[in-house]
Image (cartoon, coloured by chain):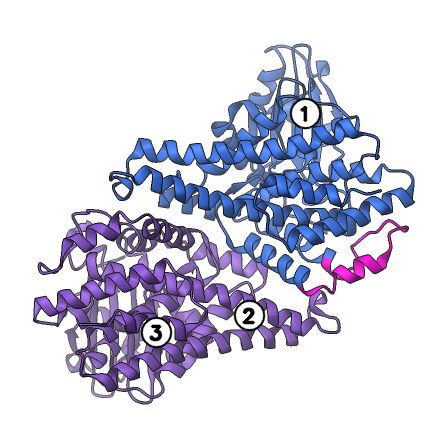
Chain colours: A blue, B purple
């Protein structure tokens, strides 16, 4: 049943799949009116833009190997099943932040969805110093709502456990466990370094007890805490947007994990964009710091409001006495305090691995002067080392810490 | 395929099931030589002793309802599948503490196993003030080994996640969530009270912010932290023993949960036995305090040794440098410190629910003087309230705390 499509065979596939055909073509219209172009630059999948006279769509197909390496690195295409199922849940919770899904096929490991042609990738936009006044509002809502409405705070015990089971995403979790939580902290052949980066710094943190233990704890958390359905890969390359709209894409890493992971990964990518800036770019630096503060603060307020409002609506017996709502609010505050610590821990892990692991971020890699890049990377490593071994009262304290390490 | 057996039909079933028949009877021997007697006094299942001339066995069958209530309380018999699968894993890890399994059938929801006729239930033995010099050694090994060898510290990421999925034990987890973590903390119709217990104390703790929040955190931990395959119901009624041997039975509540839950439930049942004693029973009180201390200390040492030895054997790349073993040891210590806090938290929850929830423990219920029992119960509630809202350095501090509340 499954076959790998290409720019040629895709038209025949669409012709024979009436659900997709009818989206693009009139009944008697010829498939010759279709244009198909592969535009995927990701590591995992093939992405086609399909154009007809009346509209354009995106068709994304998973192949049973790691695209960026080739057929010799097998990776089960079941990841598309996780992406499809996660997209559906996210779409239901946050319709305005998730692309329209028109068709999906587990057999073909593909999904047909809205072509976001009026939107660009956030990472590239930040490299171009673009400003998005609604982004932090949007992302904090996406985080607070997807993470609340898939958690035990909202779902009943049965539904939540069925979800956990369904999203047992073994292979993609393993990639995260290896490439975020393990290889960057050892002399692994998959790691890649800026040749100008002082390896003494790298080797020092790889033998630092407090860093090792803190990272081991974050990895354990990632592997054991099934709190909510995570996006699982929420870096700034997984967000497409313009000044008005924000879309979160590519949830193939979705699984039930610790809520702080999604938040931390996103904040880390903002932080790395901050570190990539030159000394004089004060205004954009201020903007990114505001993004970090706003994202956290808005998320925390919205998540708490979700908790409180749900409790008010359901009036459970155990929180139903004079003063109980204040008590529940205290519980919410304590819970969010823990999410904050988790988020900063995961933030640090992401910053480590993007510096000394396999996958880099364009914000840093596009710094052509390798010596300057090495200074930036040294700052990031030292900042991450400090963040993961410290406790902070609030996001403002974290920002102050980040500023301290921004000395090029 | 499935049918409910009784003392009559069970012989025909055995006759037609050659794997069981051959265990009990010679080839041409008549089933008239079999004796079958139902001895189950549990809440959930039917348990038969089957005797032939050459041996005796236990046959345990789950019925699709809650036995202690009747057919009007349906409870899926899939719980027997969890029990069978958990028994197999526990048996492999701890052969000497788990009964021999001779035959099991998921279709019939039954298991045929060793008849522990030289062993008695620990709870009853403690009520009779019996002493078991090897028990703490045995139970601490059972805990340290079953909980280590099913965790992420030992299993690879894939196997562990497959286990988590397989042991998605929705119905029995829901029973724990309701009857341990919810109903005792609200005015629920299922709760039962000693009529002499002062309800002011009960109502006070049900409206105490710090207790409510602490319990909510423990419940959340139970619902989200998939650390290891738990027994899930490790009270002193789930242990059969004599002076030389110890067996852990009835793991139908098995699921992937927080390690501290199994430890806490067991320690709580020791603690309640302690509280049930009269003022003058100093010697048995000392014995129980030793059991609590030994169980924790031995568990902690054995679990840590499991971690260290495994790390030494596998020599993973990330813990492979001069001094790395000390670092890993520090990680183990930090992890076990968290397990300790969790265990005491769960201990307190079990003590609450056995006092003001539906299910009671015989140690307390057999106190005939309801006024004295009410004093014991008041002490347990106040002790649990203190334990769950405090942090302790070590088990000795916890023992000192428990002693403070033992004033009849």
* Residue drawn at 67 percent across, 55 percent down: A178
Circle 3: element type: helix
- Residue extent of the magenta highlight: A185-209
Q: Is residue B111 magenta?
A: no
Disc 2 + disc 3, Cβ < 8 Å: no
Picture quadrant where residue A272 is located: top right
In the displayed structure, A134 sits above or below A160; it is above
Both marks 2 and 1 on one chain: no
Both marks 1 and 3 on one chain: no
- Mark 2 or mark 3: whose residue is earlier in sequence: 2
Q: Image check: A333 left or right of B125?
A: right
Numbered mark located on residue B52 in the image: none
Q: Is residue A207 magenta?
A: yes
Q: Which residue is mark 1?
A: A12
Q: Which residue is mark 3?
A: B400
Which chain letter goes with mark 1?
Answer: A
Distance between the alpha carbons at the discs numbered 1 and 3: 77 Å
Of A150 and B290, nearer the camera is B290
Distance between the alpha carbons at the discs numbered 2 and 1: 61 Å
Q: Quadrant of the N terminus of chain A?
A: top right
Residue A51: % across, % down: 70, 17
Disc 2 + disc 1, Cβ < 8 Å: no
Number of residues whose C-alpha sits closer than 10 Å to that of mark 1, classed few (under 14), some (14–19) or many (20 or more): few
* Residue drawn at 74 percent across, 61 percent down: A206
Picture quadrant where residue A276 is located: top right
Q: Quadrant of the C terminus of chain A?
A: top right
Q: Which residue is mark 2?
A: B333
């Amino acid at each position: 049943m499954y076959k790998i499509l290409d720019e040629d065979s895709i038209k025949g596939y669409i012709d024979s799949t009436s659900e997709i055909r009818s989206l693009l073509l009139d009944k008697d219209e010829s498939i010759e009116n279709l244009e198909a172009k592969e535009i995927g630059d990701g590591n995992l999948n093939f992405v086609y833009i399909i154009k007809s006279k009346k509209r354009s769509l995106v068709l994304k197909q998973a192949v049973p190997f790691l695209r960026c390496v080739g057929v010799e690195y097998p990776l089960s295409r079941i990841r598309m099943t996780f992406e499809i199922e996660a997209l559906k849940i996210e779409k239901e919770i946050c319709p305005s932040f998730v692309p329209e899904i028109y068709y999906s096929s587990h057999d073909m490991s593909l999904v047909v969805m809205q072509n976001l042609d009026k939107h660009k990738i956030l990472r590239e936009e930040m490299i171009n110093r673009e400003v998005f006044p609604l982004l932090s509002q949007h992302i904090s809502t996406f985080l607070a709502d997807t993470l609340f409405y898939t958690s035990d705070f909202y779902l009943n015990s049965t539904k939540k456990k069925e979800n956990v089971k369904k999203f047992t995403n073994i292979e993609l979790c393993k990639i995260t466990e290896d490439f975020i939580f393990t290889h960057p902290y050892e002399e692994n052949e998959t790691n890649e370094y800026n040749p100008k980066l002082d390896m003494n710094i790298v080797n020092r943190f790889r033998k630092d007890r407090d860093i090792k233990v803190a990272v081991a704890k974050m990895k354990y958390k990632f592997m054991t805490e099934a709190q909510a359905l995570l996006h699982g890969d929420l870096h700034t390359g997984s967000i497409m947007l313009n000044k008005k709209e924000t879309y979160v894409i590519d949830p193939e890493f979705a699984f039930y994990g610790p809520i702080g992971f999604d938040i931390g990964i996103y904040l880390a990518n903002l932080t790395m964009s901050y570190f990539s800036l030159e000394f004089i770019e004060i205004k954009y630096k201020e903007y990114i710091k505001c993004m970090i503060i706003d994202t956290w603060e808005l998320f925390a307020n919205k998540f708490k409001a979700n908790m409180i409002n749900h409790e008010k609506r359901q009036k459970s017996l155990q929180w139903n006495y004079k003063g109980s709502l204040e008590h529940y609010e205290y519980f919410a505050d304590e819970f969010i305090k823990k999410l904050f610590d988790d988020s900063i821990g995961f933030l640090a892990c992401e910053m480590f691995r993007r510096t000394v692991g396999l996958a880099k971020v364009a914000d840093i890699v596009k710094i052509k002067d390798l010596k300057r890049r090495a200074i930036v990377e040294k700052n990031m490593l030292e900042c991450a080392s400090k963040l993961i071994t410290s406790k902070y009262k609030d996001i403002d304290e974290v920002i102050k810490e980040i500023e301290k390490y921004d000395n090029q």
